[in-house]
Amino acid sequence: MYTRFYGFSEKPFNVTPDPKFLYLTPSHREVLASMIYGIKEKKGFISITGEVGTGKTTLIYTLLNNLNEKIKTVLIFHTTTTFEQLLKNILLELELPIVDESKTGLLHQLNEYLIQLLSREETLAIIIDEAQNLPKEVMEELRMLSNLETSKSKLLQIVLVGQPELGTKLDSDDLRQLKQRVAIRRQIKPLSQEDCKKYIEHRLNLVGSNSSEVFTSDAISLICKYSQGIPRTINIICDNAFLIGYGLSQKKVGVPIINEVIGDLDSSLLLEKPIHPRVADTLVSFPSPLKTAPLYNRVASTIFSGPILLLICLGLLTLLGMLFLQNSFTKTPDIPYPTAIRKAKKLPVETPKPSVNSELSSNVSPALIKAESNVHSSSTKPEPVTKESSKLISAPSATSTTSKAEDKIKETVSVKKDDCIFYLAQRYYHMNNETLADLILEVNPEITNANLIRVNEQIKIPEITEESLIITSPDNTYKIYLGTFQTPDAAKPYSREATVMKKEIEIIPRKVSPTDTWYRVVLGKFNNRDESLKAVSILKQKGLLPSFGNYQRPNLNQGYRRENNG
């Protein structure tokens, strides 16, 4: 809803555990490294604890993406279960047919599978999320699984991930034998104030923005204070703040909006425990959000009290009665459902016709407006782009390079379970975005749906260099592939660079799935390859090429004011 208004490529503060948005604080980095080390070195039991919303599940998905093919993994997240059901779930996740459903039969089958893995120099890691909910009896029987071992190493690695209550359970006298077998115990700590600011900046950078563009400094300090360093709470506050800011047409979120968000949120979302010392030492003092709540909140508390409330209720009942009698004689015409209601009722949703964004048009060069107008017809949707017309690397065409992508393949990989294009980008480039995903799709034309790749499918991973972003046109001129984005608005940060270089920006729609269209942004024309390479180097240094990371959206409005006044 608010992404276009703030110029985001997608929502930066969703609460889903997306590894794409993982920000590794020193604490998170230590925990992730400990899990990888403990599994690879076959340490047996590993315990990871952290408060609600500190990023435990996100770290789990990141862990799964960083383990090699020699390590088989099973993720268990339903923990209110019996030991026998837990064993069944493990075997089913391993796609093994259950031969004997008794506890003895299940243990025997698992042991046979582990011996097979040992013969292939492979290992099995079972990761149990929300492990604090495991009954003590089940946890004690889990200890028995650690008896599946050789004289040199454990056959089975078990990672217990949960809230602080998990640590309390392990410290109890009933589970002291299990505690002795836990080789690694780590705790995810809340973010410090500095880490909190970097976390917000990190997520905004990933969607093409930055904190100074959409937040005041006091607003960020207030978010850090009330979130108490809990990433999930930061996400909830920021997401609601942008929603309110969008409703008020405020491009920059300040303290009043944050106060309103905190006042509206259920108090259970914010931890009642003392703020972590690392956060408390540097917090800025702000008035209570309840004291600075909007005037209408205080007025409402006065109106909806005592006799006044009773009179209002009687008036409403009278009004409803009159409307009922009127509707009995008058047929109400059909009113189309709003989009959100149509989705809830599973009714067809009418897709609005695309149009040139008015805000974008007022701030960018005529060349950019012309390019976007070509993409968005006034009466039709952008036409789906075929494989031939969407190629970045297939000469000769206006948007292709002379070199073949296949000549610069970094690696050919086999797709594993739960892999996707973005996970592959994260694994081999240590970052992910639509640009990297598009470059992978480019050298794998057999993939017609960016959201669907098959297990064991062979996928080429291209090597990305400055040279690979150069596009040779049929007239022997050159263009630069700047990046691929979810909306045409992403071309906006490049408009000033295009003006300075006296070049034009092209926006090329690219159909990446039956329902998704991305947009490639191309800059040109350049007279020779050296000139285009120099421009690539300049754009790279300014952080404007998502292919190389550090992509930050500049404050364009300030830049245009300087130009207009100068």
Image (cartoon, rainbow, N blue to C red):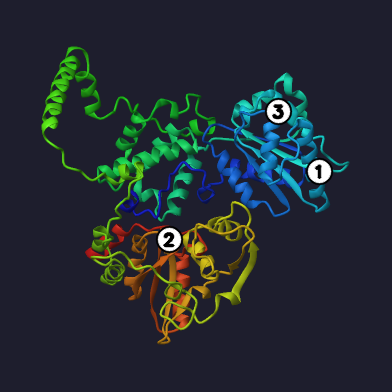
- Residue at which label 1 appears: 112
| Residue 113, position as x, y percentages in the image | 78, 45
Q: Is residue 273 above or below residue 566?
A: above
Instruction: Determine crowd level at label 2: few under 14, some 14-19, many 20+ residues with C-alpha closer than 10 A.
Output: few
User: Which residue is nearer to you in this view: 483 or 400?
Assistant: 400
| Residue 449, position as x, y percentages in the image | 49, 61
- Residue at which label 2 appears: 514
Name the residue at 63% across, 41% down. 75
- Residue at which label 3 appears: 139
Circle 2 — which element?
Answer: loop
Q: Is residue 415 above or below residue 532?
A: above
Q: In what quadrant of the picture does the C terminus appear?
A: bottom left
Upstream in the sequence, badge 2 or badge 1?
1
Q: Quadrant of residue 413?
A: bottom right
Residue 489 in view in this figure: yes
Q: Amino acid at mark 2?
A: Pro
Disc 3 to disc 1: CB gap under 8 Å: no
Spatial CA span between label 3 and label 1? 22 Å
Q: Quadrant of residue 152?
A: top right
Upstream in the sequence, badge 3 or badge 1?
1
Spatial CA span between label 3 and label 2? 46 Å
Instruction: Determine crowd level at label 1: few under 14, some 14-19, many 20+ residues with C-alpha closer than 10 A.
Output: few
Q: Amino acid at mark 1?
A: Glu
Return the mark for residue 367.
Answer: none
In the current view of this chain or complex, which residue is farthest to the right? 151
Instruction: Determine crowd level at label 3: few under 14, some 14-19, many 20+ residues with C-alpha closer than 10 A.
Output: many
Upstream in the sequence, badge 3 or badge 2?
3
| Residue 193, position as x, y percentages in the image | 48, 38
Circle 1 — which element?
Answer: helix
